[in-house]
Image (cartoon, rainbow, N blue to C red):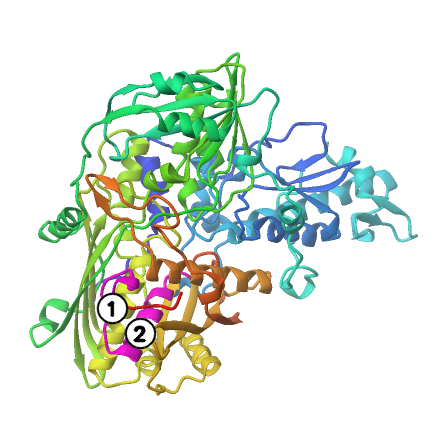
Amino acid sequence: MGKLKTFTRRAFLVTSTAVVGGVAFGAYQLAKTPDNPLPEGDGALNPWVVINQDGVSAVVPHSEMGQGVMTTLAAMVAEELDVDLDAVTVLHGPAAQAYYNSALATDRHYKASQDPAPNGWAASLTQAFPKLLSLQITGGSTSALDGMQQMRMAGASARATLLMAASQQLNIGLDRLRTEDGHVIAPDGTRLSYSELAPHAATLDPEQTPRLKSPSEWRYLGKSQPRKDQPLKATGTATFGMDVRLPGMRFASVRMSPRLGGEMISFDASTAETMPGVEKVVDLGNGVAVIARNTWLAIEAVNAIDVTWGDAPYPAENDAIFEKIETAFDQPANCTLRDEGNAGIAFAGDALTAEYRVPYLAHATMEPMNSTALYTDGKLEVWSPNQAPVLVRDTCAAAAGLEAENVEVHTTFLGGGFGRRAMVDFAEIATRVALALPGTPVQTTWSREEDMRHDHYRPGAIARMRGVLENGRIAALDGQMAAPSIMKQLLTNMLGFEMNPSDNTLTEGAHDQPYDIPNQRFRGYAADVAIPVGFWRSVGSSQNVFFHESFIDELAHEAAVDPLDFRLRHIRPQHAPSATVLETVRDMSGWTGKTADNIGRGVAFGFTFGTAVAQVVEVERDAEGLIRLNDMWIAADLGTVLDPLNAEAQLTGGAVFGLSAAIHGQITFSDGMAEQENFPDYDALRMGVTPRFHVKLLQNMERMGGVGEPGTPPAAPALANALFDLTGTRARHLPLVEQFQFYS
């Protein structure tokens, strides 16, 4: 029997990059504590905790993009430090190795979910490459998992150091001191505030292995907390990228080739140059920018430039693009995963087959791409709503011809991320524009049209599925998925030469599901299409759970077995917590497998990012034939729930993201250019047609999973399966609006 491969794409990314880049390290480098990037003399007890006369500040290394990370990570510090959460100010950390994401290479496969998290030397190995490569990244539903290691340890270490300072000042043994609400308290009742102890504590060596509190001791974690960002956003005082204002600032906008990766042959800027308030036209080589007195004028002026663009380096029409993707099936597989049993022999008899297709998708963040840059005397400052500050620093340094230490990055609030802002082309372009006006801060903002037509899209993909049934069970399952390779593009762009890595994003969400099937195999095929692709909320699982769960549903109906019971009979033997999630959503929704003629129900399951999620969707057709989404029930096992209300918000938000894409989302191409330019062309669910949500959180798994992305993958197949139950029409391609009429 073939061995299930569980080496994650993030582990692959960091290890392969290190190997190709020639990183050599030993035990010392693995154990070495990164330097504290915070300035001395300001009360920094470690990279995450600052205590001075202004109070306690938690330095959060992850970007706040609506997921509540600044609240949860601050709660981790408050918990271990013994301070009131309301008294903690949250700051965003600078670009620095100290803030590497320790969870990026964590094994979050379902087979690891019941094992204790690695510690000691095993944990050091897991964290080695993110640490050595300074991967300060917000993504992959890892922020809270990283914080459970880094932020809690930082709070506990700071508390231990403050106790040492108090012990020395009072000449009292550590075992006789205690902490409470920001004070060290002596046996006689003497109270020393953290603020008065901090100057001395900052001179002491931090405690490296402090004791962490057990969940039974938690005051904040495990309970819903008021969001730290909510008052700022409600009062309009939160600083997003586009809110940055600096003395003497100028504003810019850009136009890059609408044929992505194509050349700019020539341009005529004479009209733009005569517009009042336009200060400079900047030739970027592969595009053009205008610097002006305000953003609207910059957008109007750059659109007035007459540009001749070259051809696209990919097929010009959408049908031809998908024909190119389809030809990938004729090539050797890029990866073969979960090759168990003998699928070849198992398919000697009759098999059920199906082909599915999904389109390219945009991120469509509410805040378009933007950054502000200031270049002065060999120094560069960048203000950017980004998900990868170190990558911004290094990319902008290269663009400016500077060493990384001469670049300072300020990360603002993000008006949506979804993976798009981990690709930092927008910060690089802002730097190149600012270089044309030294000494003046320049904010470069993309128009909505530029943003949507110059994305790093979720790849278009095709799946070919085959299944064999025996006695009401799946005897064999074979999945083939073809799509452009995200990892190939990413590594090729990073390293500057052609790479062709094994890329399990091609099959993730299918090969890694806890279904007990004796013969199964999943193969991924990398299509050679040069349209830029990248990480989109839930990455490969966004399409592959749709393929997998739609086909599981088809097999259930072919076997004449209730679709939810069919899933349970295959998942129970493999992973009990996942089966419990399905049983929970069955009970929540009152699932019976029977519905009225005008009602349809569908179920789907996905184990992604270390979290098991089951969803049931109910749809209804009215007298005019229009379909409305009534309800969605979500059951999820997160292992550990740190903030119930926020976890519910993330799961429902992820589901809305998935439903919106399933119904409306698509990027199509004509003449090499994306046809969708703005929200009228790329719609999302409105509040009036969004289903009612019912969420239940479980904590049966030993390891904690992510929450930002797992709600997205099951949404599309749950809805598609509900539509089949209602109409008898099987949706094998998206978006659904092309096949069904929805109420709007």
Residue type (three-letter) at the residue carrying disc 1: Ala
Residue 318 visible to the viewer: yes
Say the numbered circle drawn on residue 534: none
398 relative to 331, above or below: above
Per the rendered image, the range of residues in magenta is 712-739
Q: Mark 2 = which residue?
A: 723
Q: Nearer the viewer, residue 267 or 382?
A: 267
Please rate how many residues cluster around mark 2, counting C-alpha atoms within 10 Å: few if below 14, some from 14 to 19, many from 20: many
Q: Nearer the viewer, residue 583 or 20?
A: 583
Q: Position of residue 223 (x, y in %)?
A: 65, 64
16 relative to 111, above or below: above
465 relative to 179, above or below: below
Please rate how many residues cluster around mark 1, counting C-alpha atoms within 10 Å: few if below 14, some from 14 to 19, many from 20: many
Identify the image quadrant of the C terminus: bottom left
Q: Position of residue 427 (x, y in %)?
A: 44, 30
Disc 1 and disc 2: Cα gap in Å?
8 Å
* In the image, residue 717 lies in the stretch drawn in magenta: yes
Q: Mark 1 = which residue?
A: 731
Q: Position of residue 65 (x, y in %)?
A: 52, 47
Contact (CB < 8 A) between labels 1 and 2?
A: yes
Position of residue 99 in the picture relative to residue 160 (left or right): left
